[in-house]
Amino acid sequence: MRSILIITVLIFCSTIVIKAQIPDVLIEQGKELLNKGTNYSDVGYLIEAEQHFQQALDLDNTNFFAQYFLAYTDYRLAIYYMQTKDDEQFKNYIQLSIEELKTILDSDDKDPEALALLASDYGEKIREDSSLAPQLAPKALSLISQVIEIAPDNPRVQLLAGKLILTLPEKYGGNKVKALVHLQKSVNLFQANREADDPIGWGYIFALTWLGINYTELNDYTTAAKIYNKALEVEPDFLWITNVLLPDVENKLNPPNE
C-alpha cells in the first residue's frame, strides 16, 4: 500500500513538472520560428511562432515571456503586412500587439520591454499612415522618454528609441542625428553584453540594420555598407540586408553604367 502511495505521489509530481515545462518548451520553439521568420521575411514561420506563444499563454496566462513574445510576433507580422501593403492585416496585427502589451503593463506599468515595444507599435502606425502623427507621435515619444529614464542601458530600449526618432516625420519629432546616438548606443550595449544572460534576446541584428539605415539617410553610404557587412557576420541569413539594403548602398557607391 505504501509503495502504491509513493508511486502515485511521484506520478502526480512528475505530471506537475511536465505541465510546468510545456509553456517553456513552446516558447523556445516559438522563438526559433520567430527568428527564422524575421531572417527570411517568411510569414509562415511568423504565424507558426504566434501559435506557439498563444498556446503557451493558454496554458499559463501569467507567463510574461509568452505574453511578450506574442506581442512581439504580432508586431513583426504587422511590419510584414505593411511591407506587403496589406493594410487590413497590418491594422489587425498592430492592434493585437498594442492590446497584448497593455495587458502586460496592467500588471507592471514600468516594464521597459513592454513600454519600448508599445512606443514602437505607435511608430509603426505612423509609418503606415502619416496622418496619425499628430495624435500618436506625442504618445510614442512620451513613452520612449519614460522608458529611457527607467532602463537607459537596455539595448532594445535604445534600439526602439532610435528607430522611432529616425522614422517619425521631422515635424513631429523625427531627427536623424538624435536617432544615430540611440542606435549607436544600442549597438554598443549589445556588443558589450553579448555574453550576458538575456532572456528576451532579440535586437542586435536590428540595431545594426537600423544604424546602417540611419547612415544611409545621412548619405554616408560607405559607413552604411560597413555596418551591413558587419551585420551579416552576425546573421548571414538576414535577407533584408542581403537582398535589399546592402545592394542599395552598393549601387549608390558604384552606380551602374547607363
Image (cartoon, grey):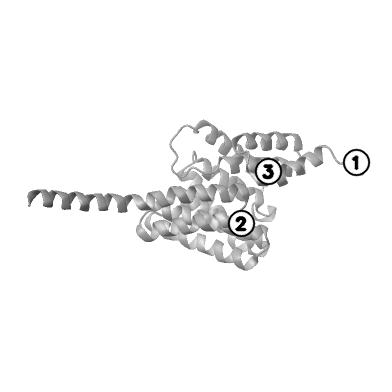
Q: CA distance from mark 1 to mark 3?
A: 23 Å
Q: Residue furthest left?
A: 1
Q: Which of disc 1 and disc 2 is earlier in sequence?
A: 2
In the displayed structure, 10 sits above or below 212; it is below
Q: As drawn, is 179 to the left or to the right of 157?
A: right
Q: CA distance from mark 3 to mark 2?
A: 16 Å
Label 2: which residue? 79
Label 1: which residue? 257
Q: CA distance from mark 2 to mark 1?
A: 34 Å
Residue 17 % position (x, y): 28, 49
In the displayed structure, 180 sits above or below 9; it is above
Quadrant for the C terminus, please: top right
Q: Nearer the viewer, residue 197 or 33?
A: 33
Q: Which mark is residue 241?
A: 3
The answer to whether the residues at label 1 and label 3 have Cβ atoms under 8 Å apart is no
Residue at figure coordinates x 47%, y 43% from the top left = 151
Q: Secondary structure at mark 3?
A: helix
Give the number of the mark in front: 2 or 1. Answer: 1
Q: Residue furthest right?
A: 258
Disc 1 residue type (three-letter):
Asn
Q: Which of disc 3 and disc 1 is earlier in sequence?
A: 3
Q: Nearer the viewer, residue 112 or 60?
A: 60
Q: Secondary structure at mark 1?
A: loop
Q: Which of disc 2 and disc 3 is earlier in sequence?
A: 2
